[in-house]
Image (cartoon, rainbow, N blue to C red):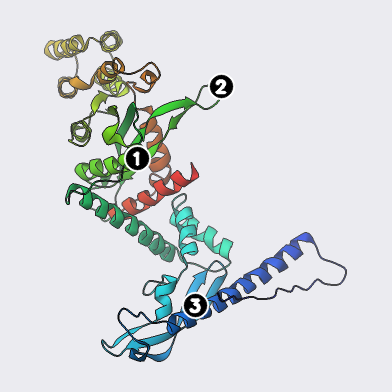
Amino acid sequence: MPTVETTIRISIRAGGATLGELEEEIASALKEAGRELLMAAVQSVQEDALGRPDRARLSSRQVQRVKVRSLDLLTRFGWMRLQRQQVVDSDKRRYRCPVDRVLGLAPRQHYSPWVQEQAVALATRVPYRQATTLLSEWMGVPLDHRTVYAWVQQAGRAVVVDEDAQQQAVFDDGEQPTSDPGVREIVVTEVDGTFIKAQREQAPHFEVRLGVLFSGKELESRTAKHKRYRLKERVLYGGVEPAEAFGERLFLAGEAKLGISHAKHLLLVGDGAEWIEALAGHRRWRATYQLDWWHIAHAIHRTFPDRPKLVAEMKRALYAGKGERLLALVSLARLAGDSDAERTAQLETYLRANQHGFYGARRLRQRLSPQARPVAVEGSGAIEKQQDLVVGRRFKGQGMRWTRKGANRLLKLRLRELDRAA
């Protein structure tokens, strides 16, 4: 096994040096040594690659060295110029640098995987220009925000391509999805959509869909003044994609980590959007649907802002399990004509379309063990919090506008980064 080595020396001025001066001197020496070692290692790998051709297609006499091609590459040690040997295949007249394949370098790639990882880690947390400034100062080299944007988008594109392939394999080609073998009593899925501002799109806004799945909740601290709960086995998925594609990919994410196809019970909680209700009835889900009570109460308050007694009566009917009475009260209010007719009609339509989801969680709790019952609730607080953390804090800043592709790719990467940090 070939080895490479280098020697590091630093100079300490007469009379000593401060800690900061020593640290700076050593860091500079380590950086230079890293470049030398990496250069020597690449040359060693190249000689090995040139010495053993791909015997499945070529013999050593079919490969001819042509010339040396240089490649400027940004690494964690700064910029360096690699000297790669170019060869030509005599049978197909195809030019290539064998070391590129061994190193995993794509055509016209001028950055190392580590550099791209740092760009992704920063850009998924702060705006691109801030990410570029931080990365430039960290690495000690000037960078342009458009370059960092391209690196991040390329990484996000790879994630989307991988998701496309998985979705097609399972839902078009009939392959079995990757599945966690554990059998859970209940898996809760909360989904929601939020809109972000668009640029270079037909509409001024477009929807970002997000879903969170979990198998339970646990208390973070028994001594804390305010109780906070952590989601058990949390799985996050999101995308700027049609509802059907979102539902299928959300299923694949949940199946891989929670085995939702063989969970005893599935509960899906949403705000009453048509695509969410349809998702609950998808053949892969077959979930119990629960309409979030907060959204019902909010819709009632918005429809009757100046009738607090009627609002209170409607909410009492809802919480008491009297959904039919709630609908009757709304119908009477519409017929009486004492409130905004259009808003009242919209509320009635909304409630009737989601009536079967008023008490989904309540019905399900009757079939759960005492330990699992607290998980099946009528609210969607988990997804509301995740919408703020995942989407709001990165995609809804002042002046931010997005293309669908750009937002979708960055969202996929942000979800992965947040999952690693969890």
Q: Residue at x 74, y 74 (%)?
A: 9
Instruction: Give the left or right position of residue 70, taking residue 309 as reference.
Output: right
Q: Measure the alpha-carbon separation of dots 1 and 3.
A: 39 Å
Q: Position of residue 401 (x, y in %)?
A: 34, 51
Element carrying mark 3:
helix
Q: Is residue 398 visible?
A: no
The residue positioned 40% from the left and 36% from the top of the image is: 234
Foreground: disc 1 or disc 2: 1
**Label number found at residue 180:** 1
The residue under label 2 is which amino acid type?
A: Arg
As drawn, the label of residue 76 is: none
Identify which amino acid the numbered label 1 is placed on: Asp
* Near-viewer residue (320 or 106): 106
Q: Which residue is mark 3?
A: 45
Q: Amino acid at mark 3?
A: Val
Classify 311 as above or below 247: above
How crowded is the residue under tag 3: few (<14 C-alpha within 10 Å), some, or many (20+)? some
SS class, disc 1: loop
- Where residue 108 sits: x, y (%)? 38, 75
Instruction: Look at the image and tell me in which quarter the N terminus lies.
Output: bottom right
Residue 330 sits in quarter: top left
Nearer the viewer's eye, disc 2 or disc 3?
Answer: 3
The residue that label 2 is drawn on is 222
CA distance for labels 1 and 2 = 31 Å
